[in-house]
Amino acid sequence: MPDFFRTSLTGLVAFQRALDVTSHNIANVNTPGYSRQRVELGTRPPSAYGNGWVGNGVVVQTTRRMFDDFIALQSRTSSSSLQYLNVYARNAERLSNLLSDSTTGLTATLQNFVNALQGVANSPASVPARQVLLGEAQTLQQRLQEFAAHLAEMDREVNFRLQTEVAEVNSIAQALAKLNLEITAAYGRTGGRPPNDLLDQRDRLLDQLAEKVSINSVVQNDGAVNVFIGNGQALVLGTQASELTVVPDEFDPVRFGVAIRTANGPLDITANIRGGALGGWLDYRREQLDPARNTIGRITLGLAEIVNTQHMRGVDLSGEMGGAFFAVGAPEVLPSTANTGSGAVTATIADVQALTQRDYVLELTADGWQLRDAHSGAAVMMTGSGTQADPFVAEGVALVVDGSPSVGDRFLIRPTRSAIDGLDVLISDPSKIAAAAPLSTGIGAGNLGTGEISEAEITDPAGLVTSPVQIRFTSASTYSIDGGPDVPFTGSPIEITHNGWTVTITGAPAVGDTFTVRPSGPGDNRNALRLAEALQRPILNGGTTSLSAAVGQFVGGIGVAAKQAQASRDAQAVVHEENLAERDRVSGVNLDEEAANLLRYQQAYQAAAQLIRVADTLFQTLLSATQR
């Protein structure tokens, strides 16, 4: 039945709870991850009285946590993306700064080498100019190797960062599993009432975990949360937490990936990691660092190919044919640690023009050998049978398979990366620089015809002339060399091959006209000019891009990628700030609002207390009346 005193007492208790919650909110106004709480009040079941109902006061139904799961998910997702972009953009910027420096960058260093070649072309007999060229060649070698060393150090840094991030992920996962245990117990003790502060702690941990890696979370019926990463791998299931670990790469033991421990051993999930700092480090390594290391190697191979080919077509100050100017390292082949056969693969560069910046995996399947892109897994066409006489050839790389491989055996092919390891300047004597063309040609001063002679092309260096050779036209259809027998010809142009060289005479030479082929002197600079020009000649990307253009595209591409990553990071930061503001609007503590609640609940509490006082007065009056 209705009870005036008890009804007043329910109000007193309810408003005391409301004041407790308000003071809790105010006390935690600066607590990270705290969600504002609110007492939910409801009427107690009324009592029938005569022809109606009379209420029995108020009851505290629950203490509600002001929390929106959808907004929290948005904030968590944007946080994961922001941390990913922070890592990616910061490291892309470092890479760009390393390679694009106006003084020590790749473009500037290559240009200094070209300028030194031009200096030799301007003064081909000058020993100081030749010494400058050798110095710039050595500087170019050192700079390329320094770039490679810096990039290798960045790769090692990725390993270290992966270890650090994995350790933090494991720590958070263990804390989540422990909180799941406390939360499920708390739900059981309170008949399903939510333990708000524990839930705040857990959501705070989920936020921290999302900064490390992209996650999906699912709440169970008992209140525990399950957390999944990668391609659905369970990191936390109820009160059990799995453990991540770093594992050596299948092909390269000094390169780490990420795995999750299972009953059957570590399961590599490197390719499935997305978002957060972990995803940022892995994607930066895959999309920026690896291509940069391979591209610098490809540029090194192109440099050596261009310079060596042209240098060997010239002669030095002693009149000897030039040798190779640069040495480079061979392609790298790494067998998988899971291989069971005894096969071996040897790789060589077959065509510099066809080289790409990709790495490859060669695998023996039941249908034969298959070549795939190491990162994307896309099939790569190759020709040949893999033997020494008929090697596999794909994108400028020749592969020879030896031994007895087993089905399933795999080999990682890195065609260009190790080129810098063996980079060396093979010339130390300035006089050995082949700045001159081997032969020069000339037209007789008294010629009457319109004949012109081309430069001599060398077909056999062993047969080079050591003294001038004269070509005389003895009739309208014959010529002789150094007074030798007449050689017939028909029409124009006239191609003449003699003792390891070839010239072409065009026009209409008259009878008695003479042409000479002689060794070049020390002042000849034609090969030095051709060396400088060769660096502008298309040789890479299928013969469509010069070395200088390839360097420009490479450095520019890294700069553009860094700018794009920075722009994406800045845009994501705005999105994340908006999400945080929306979350704070729902869950944050507003001191003005709490002050108003404090005053409202205080007045209500005082009113309830006054009701109890009135009830006490009425009761005392009743007792006094019955005592008479």
Image (tube, helix red, strand yellow):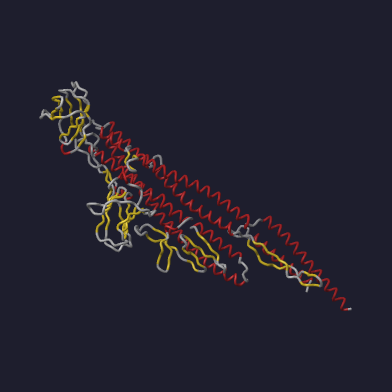
Instruction: List x then y, in percent, for residue 567.
Output: 50, 46
Residue 251 drawn above or below residue 52: above
Is residue 396 in sight in this rendering? yes
Position of 562 compared to 435: left or right?
A: right
Give the total of numbered labels. Answer: 0
Query: In percent of the image, x 30 and y 57: which residue is there?
Result: 369
Residue 86 drawn above or below residue 617: above
Front-lying residue, 414 or 139: 414
The N terminus, quarter of image:
bottom right
Position of 475 compared to 601: left or right?
A: left
Furthest-right residue in this view = 628
- Quarter residue 161 falls in: bottom left
Instruction: List x then y, in percent, for residue 171.
Output: 49, 63
- Quarter residue 182 falls in: bottom right
- Quarter residue 495 falls in: top left
Residue 166 drawn above or below residue 494: below
Furthest-front residue in this view = 490
Instruction: List x then y, in percent, for residue 625.
Output: 87, 76
Front-lying residue, 617 or 48: 48
Instruction: List x then y, in percent, for residue 229.
Output: 48, 61
Position of 350 compared to 486: left or right?
A: right
Furthest-bottom residue in this view = 627
The C terminus, quarter of image:
bottom right
Front-lying residue, 134 or 342: 342
